[in-house]
């Protein structure tokens, strides 16, 4: 018994010694970056304990104001996160081949599987090659009729708020974006705009909050203890509902393709000449038809990609559109300039004109407004990466296993690149702007080889929405507009919606 106790104490002492040595290594790294004090075992947990989601976001953003562009945060049990916003270091991480998505994305796996967002290595390259044709510009041109149709429905749904008090436009935009991604990329109509209590949209919000709460939990390094979380069982139920929804979308499209015999007899070939102009295969069609090593994708393979694009294709665009609306409501002079551009090009037919990508391309000021809104409020404010090999940075060696958080929100607020960074100034993106930007100073859609595959899709949808809304309504701020705060889970959202008022244009 004595020897057993001695061995146990010796083992504990050895582990504490290793822990202490590791902590000294992390403290040395922090000295090269700057960062908040951290407790011996619980690290910086004290900063986030009992804080709301908006408070946590403000704390993380505030660290850069206090410690500089790159911040070392030592969490509980020596869990180091380097929160980066300097273009030099962000570029180094995004171009590195020796990284994978960070631990945050592991929490998404029960829901999204290992689709394009989470996968890495050979699987990522294979899936990217399969999916890329679905976002070719000629395919996107064919989606314009859907964007127009769904935006017209959105405009009609908002009619009841004209001339009345403030209301939250965020949920309307969510359902509109969900209808758009299903009709364009999945080829099915779900009519979400007719169902304000859409279960899928509600489930995505719940999952986003569950995952955020895990990220700032003291037990985040111990995934096997997830069953102890108070929301563990509820998360399982929500994931089941989300999977049921995407399964129904897949099955509906599968049946449609089987019914369209002429299409069903044509085998999909990603190398086919004139692929983009000959057919209107959706993203889901390509997943259903493609063969890898002579075999079709499994149902699980298809669902994880559909889950990924259903989430990314509606939640991020909802954020981008909604905050653009908010910024236009708060800056009436800028909204008027956008309207004058629309009116100058479309005239009395602005409300009924079928918008095309070439038409939108000529709206230069609208483009500047969209870009500035994405700068000020990037839909994805943080990107996570995990280092697979040691890396040199800031004159020190960053060990493999370190987590990087690329803080896009802070990157876009570099005063040397964007003077008066908190102000909404679309002219920053004019051709006459003298302040030169590097490729990693403005990255609303990430950058490098893993940049957002759907960025052109998102920009087209955003532009159609803004033109359709401003052609019909003048958007005014609500009484509580100035109280809107940011909260970041998987995407950047408003704390209590986007409160606006509408005045009908005549």
Image (cartoon, rainbow, N blue to C red):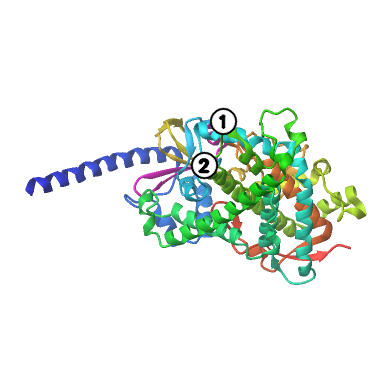
Residue 29 percent across, percent down from the top left: 40, 38
Judging depth in this view, the residue of 56 and 279 nearest the camera is 279
The residue labelled by disc 2 is 118
Q: Residue 426: tell me if it is visible.
A: no
* Magenta span includes 87: yes
Quarter of the image for the C terminus: give it.
Answer: bottom right
- Circle 2 SS class: loop
- Circle 1 SS class: loop
Residue 397 percent across, percent down from the top left: 41, 31
Judging depth in this view, the residue of 494 and 480 nearest the camera is 494
Classify residue 339 as left or right of residue 71: right
- Figure label count: 2
Which label was assigned to residue 294? Answer: 1
Examine the rendered structure and indicate whether residue 40 appears above or below residue 416. Answer: below
Magenta segment: 68-92
Q: Residue visible at 37% across and 40% down?
A: 26
Examine the rendered structure and indicate whether residue 147 appears above or below residue 388. Answer: below
Q: Residue 53: tell me if it is visible.
A: yes
Classify residue 397 as left or right of residue 433: left
């Amino acid at each position: 018994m004595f020897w057993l106790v001695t061995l146990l104490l010796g083992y504990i002492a050895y582990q504490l010694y290793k822990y202490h040595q590791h902590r000294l290594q992390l403290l040395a790294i922090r000295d090269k970056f700057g960062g908040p004090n951290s407790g011996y075992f619980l690290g910086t947990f004290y900063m986030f304990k009992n804080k709301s989601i908006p408070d946590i976001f403000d704390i993380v953003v505030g660290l850069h104001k206090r410690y500089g562009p790159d911040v070392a945060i030592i969490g509980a049990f020596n869990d180091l996160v380097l929160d980066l916003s300097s273009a030099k270091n962000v570029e180094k991480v995004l171009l590195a081949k020796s990284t994978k998505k960070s631990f945050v994305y592991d929490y998404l796996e029960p829901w999204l599987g290992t689709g394009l967002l989470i996968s890495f290595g050979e699987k990522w390259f294979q899936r990217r090659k399969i999916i890329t044709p679905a976002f070719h510009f000629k395919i996107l041109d064919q989606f314009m009729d859907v964007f127009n149709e769904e935006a017209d429905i959105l405009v009609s749904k908002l009619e009841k708020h004209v001339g009345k008090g403030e209301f939250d436009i965020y949920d309307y935009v969510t359902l509109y974006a969900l209808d758009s991604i299903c009709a364009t990329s999945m080829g099915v109509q779900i009519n979400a705009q007719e169902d304000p209590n859409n279960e899928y949209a509600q489930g995505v919000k719940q999952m986003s909050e569950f995952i955020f709460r895990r990220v700032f939990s003291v037990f985040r390094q111990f995934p096997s203890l997830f069953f102890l979380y108070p929301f563990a069982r509820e998360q399982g139920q929500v994931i089941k509902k989300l999977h049921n929804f995407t399964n129904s979308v897949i099955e509906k499209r599968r049946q449609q393709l089987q019914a369209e015999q002429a299409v069903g007899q044509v085998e999909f070939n990603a190398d086919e000449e004139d692929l983009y102009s000959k057919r209107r295969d959706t993203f889901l069609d390509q997943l259903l038809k493609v063969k890898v090593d002579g075999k079709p994708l499994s149902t699980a393979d298809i669902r994880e990609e559909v889950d990924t694009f259903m989430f990314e294709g509606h939640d991020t665009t909802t954020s981008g559109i909604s905050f653009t609306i908010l910024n236009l409501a708060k800056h009436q002079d800028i909204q008027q300039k956008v309207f004058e551009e629309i009116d100058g090009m479309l005239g009395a037919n602005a409300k009924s004109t079928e918008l095309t990508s070439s038409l939108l391309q000529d709206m230069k000021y609208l483009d500047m407004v969209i870009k500035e809104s994405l700068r000020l409020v990037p839909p994805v404010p943080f990107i996570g990466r995990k280092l697979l090999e040691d890396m040199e940075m800031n004159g020190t060696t960053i060990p493999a296993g370190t987590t990087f958080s690329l803080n896009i929100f802070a990157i876009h607020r570099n005063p040397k690149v964007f003077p008066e960074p908190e102000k909404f100034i679309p002219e920053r993106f004019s051709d006459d702007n003298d302040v030169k930007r590097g490729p990693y100073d403005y990255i609303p859609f990430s950058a490098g080889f893993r940049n957002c595959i759907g960025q052109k899709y998102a920009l087209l949808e955003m532009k159609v929405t803004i033109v359709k809304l401003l052609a019909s309504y003048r958007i005014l701020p609500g009484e509580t507009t100035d109280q809107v705060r940011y909260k970041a889970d998987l995407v950047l959202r408003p704390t209590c919606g986007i409160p606006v008022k509408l005045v009908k244009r005549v």
